[in-house]
Amino acid sequence: MTIAEKILSAKSGKSSATPGEIVEAFPDLVMSHTATWRSASVMQRIGATKLYDPNRLAIVLDHISPAKTEKYAADQQTSRNFARKNGVTKFYDVDAGIAHLVLMEAGHVLPGDLIVGTDSHCTIYGSLGALGTGIGYTEVTSVWITGKLWLKVPESVRIILEGKFPAGVYSKDLMLHLIGKLGADGCGYKSVEFYGGSVSGLSVSERMTMTNLAMEMGVKCAFVPPDDKTAEYLKGRLADFGRYQPVWADADAKYERDIPVDLSTLEPMVACPHEVENTKPIGEVTGTHIDQVFLGSCANAKYEDLVVAAGILRGRKIHSGVRMIVTPGSKQIMLQAMNSGILQTLLESGAMVTNPGCGACAGDGGTLADGEVCLSTANRNFIGRMGSNKSQIYLSSPATLAASAIKGVISDPREFVTE
Amino acid sequence: MESFIQGRVYKFGDNINSDIIIPGRYLIYIDRERLGQHAFEMLGEGFGDKLRSFDILVAGRNFGCGSAREQAATAIQGLGIKAVVAASFARTFYRNAINDGLPIVECPDLYAAVQEGDEIRIDLEAGQIRLGSKEYPFPKMPESVRKILELGGLAEYLKTQLQA
């Protein structure tokens, strides 16, 4: 069996699962973010009072945090009160950061877990070997109450990575390359597993970017099979390391297809407005005017991402025509960046740093006016996502973003990164 | 829910994402009326109002891709749209539509054949769409899914389960 088949069969109490089959599965964790109040309101509307298991709930108030209007404040209050009243201990308030990163940092995501949540980018949990997938808020209510949901067992695809990234090329570029090549539904409904000689060399942070961006080619879930790096990341985060029990695919697991990629042939990539699949190699967009850059989101606002950007910006100034917004992915990331001087480097280069959270990616601050152009490290460039429907969003790696901030136009990071 | 859904078709292309259907700034609402007022507004002023004169949306591949926001399905209902037929759906939209009580049908052949303004009739029970004199078959929905749609969505379904 593949990883998805193993997890889905285990969580539905079966000995096997085959693609196309519908199983009734019991998730280990149900994540809800700023949408929590909506699920709570459904629960109230239908007259339900009892949760299946409060320990399986995780609530993180990450979008539009802290509240910017009374409506948001009231909704957050509803979520907060819901958590308190129902004994939800995995509750993280508006100071914590982006749900996905917060939950992984806190050791709530384990290999082999089934995790559903009110966010399409739950696929990121596969960076630690967990099956993460998005559902709507009413279905979250349903899982809160019944403990289970129906899931179709997906077919699996292998992406096989060989070779080494050239200088200035990162896992974001790999994913933009794949999304451009395969399309927004190129892996629709599929489970993706990353293999190949290159995987062991990729950091957990890079794996998070891969499994996060995989959503943009339509996957149901994506996995990097657990290895030493996974164990190292979780050591110290788990109260009981005995719970670390990796799930790997069987040697005779069946895959719909294999997609080989030679990392050494990749270039920095940019997704152009208004679809993520509209990708181009950096050379074709160099010189494009930008008004704002946004270093943030669950895709690329991890500590390593800030280090990459700061490495380019150290001792340099961003262009006078560009606003640079840095929104660290979580409080832990922000603290680490503060202690190591990364925040100072970014601030001195001319960037502004906001509180951790989803920030401008979810339309909170950094709103774009008519005709403005933003280069962002986020995972979506859909029309109007950051403001005006006459604004434009390009997506890139943190390195391309930093190089572009300095030059004032979209620029090749390889000029600044030599190793 | 009626067994037949009949009406005029508006036709979209591929990859209509949920940010286009309802922008994130309106996720503070969960009711059909207010969401409907802002549905598809990223495509231009009055675009949503134009859609109100149609009954069924037909789209290409990957309709509802992107964000898992359930309000994408709610907003479409807020426009008075009775069903969505697409060549394929993003999985989150597919689930959300069922859970929101919005009938959806995957039928690539109908997508290829239909034009804006055409009248179609969807027979959910038989698994067929009629366009002119031709019938386009689609895989029938499992009974459990039809049950949720009949009750108007997952919340109502849960309510009946709790009362049982």
Image (cartoon, rainbow, N blue to C red):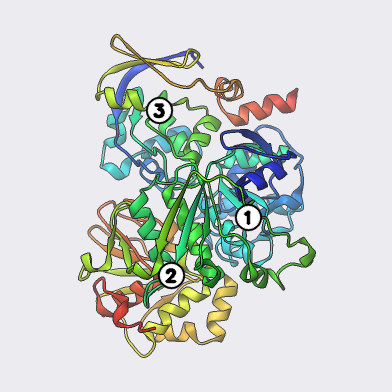
* CA separation in Å, label 3 and label 1: 33 Å
- Circle 1 or circle 2, nearest the eye: 2
Nearest to the eye among marks 3 and 2: give it.
2
N-terminal-most mark, 1 or 2: 1
Tell me how far mark 3 sits from mark 2, CA to CA.
44 Å
Q: SS at mark 1?
A: loop
Identify the amino acid type marked 1. Ala
Q: Which mark is residue A163?
A: 2
> Label 3: few (<14), some or many (≥20) within 10 Å?
many
Q: Residue A297 location, x and y as percent?
A: 46, 63
Q: Which residue is mark 1?
A: A130
Q: Look at the image and tell me whether residue A86 can be seen.
A: no
| Element marked by disc 3 | strand
Q: Name the residue nearer the viewer: A29 or A225.
A: A225
Q: Position of residue B34 (x, y in %)?
A: 43, 37
Three-letter code for the amino acid on which mark 2 is drawn: Gly
The image shows residue B73, relative to residue B142, as above or below, that is below
Q: Residues within 10 Å of mark 1 (few under 14, many from 20)?
A: many
